[in-house]
Amino acid sequence: MSYFNSAPQSAEVSFFNSTEDFSELLALTETLGLDASDPPTCIIRNLVVRGLRFNLLDWNSPTADPNASPIFMVHGGAVSAHTWDLVAMQLARKFRVITPDIRGHGDSEWPRDGDSDHHEMMEDLAAIINELELPPTVVVGHSMGGALVMRLALVHPELICGLGIIDFTPQSNYPGLAAGKIRLFDSLEHYAQRAAKYGDRHPDELAYAARYELLQRLDGKLMPKHDPRHVMGGPDPEYYPGTPEFEDMAAAEMPALVMWGSNSFFVTEQKCRRLAEVMPLGETSVIEDAGHQLFLEQPEQFLRAMTDFANRV
């Protein structure tokens, strides 16, 4: 197997800012009209918790408020921590931002037994937060990551001072991926073309994302860089088995932001508003003219909403 991005190969940290990948991120940031000046520092490191090796990115800046709560961002299924790069760079100007690759995804280890049950994945997140000795944290999850942070809020509320659920609700509209099915692509461009069908994303951003979301097999074909045994929640054929229901989230007593894209195929406005309403401190934010990958389609809108929320918790 071969990879298209650099990642640390040991316990030593890697300085993302000094890589060619980071230069491409700066160019993309400028293309999309975001601030590329004096970028925050990002280190990439391996962390071993619960018997697995996890890859994570840790963003920080001299301008960050030392009294502000960190932001811990959990990516969705079949992508990686780098899906947050565009917005993590901007948020890190004020907050420390940590983005891990969840088990079986990106540059984190695949569990030998293929166990990617959502409960285990949620406990991974709790272990990472504890290992980093983070104070109560703003925890944000997109898509499948939203399902994981919902569980985290109910099982480990002491770790969370603010909860962001991004384009995910109980009873989502997307059926998930079939277990064991391996999607193959001929090139990075082929993958980007397929991904373009699921949202209005800039071609340069799609090309950047492809570097982190694919690996090359020995036969030259490209496949998503995640464990194909993972079916968005484990071996149970039910979609996202064990995801908290709307009524369960009434026990999540921390400030909570439910955000969705106005054009998302994944959720409905009715379900998003219902989720926010059942949580005692729930609120909503809709990102206009955006689909499921709303923070990549409309990053400025996302950043305004997320910054405002993080400032208040």
Image: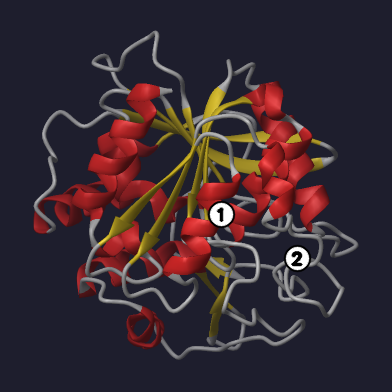
Looking at the image, which is closer to me, 129 or 313?
313
Q: Amino acid at mark 2?
A: Gly
Q: Is residue 13 above or below residue 170?
A: above
Q: Position of residue 286 (x, y in %)?
A: 32, 57
Q: Position of residue 51 (x, y in %)?
A: 85, 40
Quadrant (top left/top right/bottom left/bottom right) for the C terminus: top left
Secondary structure beneath label 1: helix
The label on residue 233 is: 2
- Residue at (58%, 15%) from the top-left corner? 135
Q: Which callout, 2 or 1, points to the residue nearer the camera?
A: 1
Q: Amino acid at mark 1?
A: Leu
**Residue 212 found in image quarter:** bottom left
Residue 80 relative to residue 28: left or right: right
Q: Position of residue 252 (x, y in %)?
A: 66, 36
Give neighbour class at mark 2: few <14, some 14-19, many 20+ (Cα, 10 Å): many
Residue 55 relative to residue 49: left or right: left
Looking at the image, which is closer to me, 270 or 147?
270
Of pointers 2 and 1, the one earlier in the residue sequence:
2
Looking at the image, which is closer to me, 210 or 288?
288
